[in-house]
Amino acid sequence: MFSFLSKIKSIFSRRAWKEKYEKYERHISSVALISGFIIDTLTLSRIDRFFETFVFFGYLFLASTGIILVNLAEQNRLGEKLSKFHTLFLVVIQFSFGALFSGFTVFYFRSASLTASWPFILFLLALLVGNEFFRTRYQKLVFQISILFVAIFSLSIFYVPIITKTLGVGTFIVSGSISLVIIGLFLFVVSCFLPNRIYESKKTIAGSILGIFVIINIFYFTNIIPPIPLSLKDVGVFHNVSKKISGYEVIGEDRSWYEFLFPFQRISLMKEKPIYVLSSVFAPTNLNTNIVHNWQYFDEGIKRWVSVSKIEFAIEGGADGGYRGYSQKTNLFTGYWRVDIETPRGQVIGRIRFKIVEVKDFLRLETKKF
């Protein structure tokens, strides 16, 4: 009986768990990464809600606190008992940054057209996946501050518009300025506890922050950063769109299920009849702005997309399903077309591609709600 109890005790002892954790650390970390990303995808819905705000700023607080505690422990400024938790503090930093970049990837991905914003999305994904391999790097102050600044700047980009209820270059500049102020205040706090460590690394830290600031600004002004916090909820191409009391009613072609697998939706050209594109774009509550439907066709001669019409209209924020609006175009011709849903300064929120073909058979049209 005593031997049995001792075996049970050994299995559940702290040492046994530590050994098992170290043995399967990489697998546990990978499973945690994938699980966390799936959970974020399912639970994070609207960036302007209290839950999402609490989660993001909570993780940012944990990461900042972890950085301070790690460096204090390395300098033996926490006392013998607390300094033993140095490894735990590193885990807190890694966990917090992993959760932050997982959430960033979810929201930026929802707001992005991959063809336009893939470099920035790839950048976030690299930080998210790389977070699992940066364990030793998290022991270096310069690396900690650099990743923290990326997190602060990314967070500012989509929270400043929510607070100011505006979008555009001015709002982005404010976001960058606030990020610099916050990281500056954080460095001041750290320097109060660890003046020597900040002094030794001040040039490297300044260069790293400046480099990150310049790169993110290049991403923005080349329209690589998606127009967060706007996101495309739905878009479709139809033969007719009409607004009813209960919402929009559309008339489109009845399609086979497999047609949705094709990159270009087929739509028949009806003589002297327009084609409509109806989109639903989400914006946070009280953030009213304009969006643009940029109609383009593919010119086979020059092998380029050519813009033929830009139709701008206002949208209102707050609706879960997004604000619906449409544009129409006449004098169309057969070939490959696309309509980019953009901000007035050209950031692509989403895109619909379709191929206009001649009517060969009787059209099977269907009417539905949108």
Image: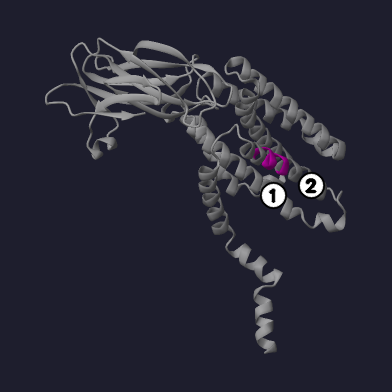
For residue 101, side relative to residue 344 (left or right): right
Residue at the image position 84 percent from the left and 58 percent from the top = 81
Residue at the image position 57 percent from the left and 21 percent from the top = 287
Q: Residue furthest bottom?
A: 1
Q: What type is the residue that disc 2 sits on?
A: Leu
Query: Element under label 2?
Result: helix
Residue at the image position 45 percent from the left and 13 percent from the top = 313
Residue at the image position 56 percent from the left and 53 percent from the top = 32
Query: Element under label 1?
Result: helix
Q: Position of residue 283 (x, y in %)?
A: 53, 25
**Which residue position is annotated with label 1?**
92
First to last magenta residue range: 56-62
For residue 365, side relative to residue 224 (left or right): left
Q: Are marks 1 and 2 in contact (CB under 8 Å)?
A: yes
Q: Position of residue 31 (x, y in %)?
A: 53, 55
Classify residue 269 by image quadrant.
top left
Q: Is residue 333 above or below residue 192?
A: above
Q: Residue furthest left?
A: 361
Q: What type is the residue that disc 1 sits on?
A: Val
Q: Is residue 315 above or below residue 257?
A: above
Question: Is 248 within the magenta?
Answer: no
Distance (Cα) linking label 1 and label 2: 10 Å
Label 2 Cα neighbours within 10 Å, binned few <14 / some 14-19 / many ≥20: many
**Which residue position is annotated with label 2?**
69
Question: Toward the viewer: 106 or 326?
Answer: 326
Label 1 Cα neighbours within 10 Å, binned few <14 / some 14-19 / many ≥20: many
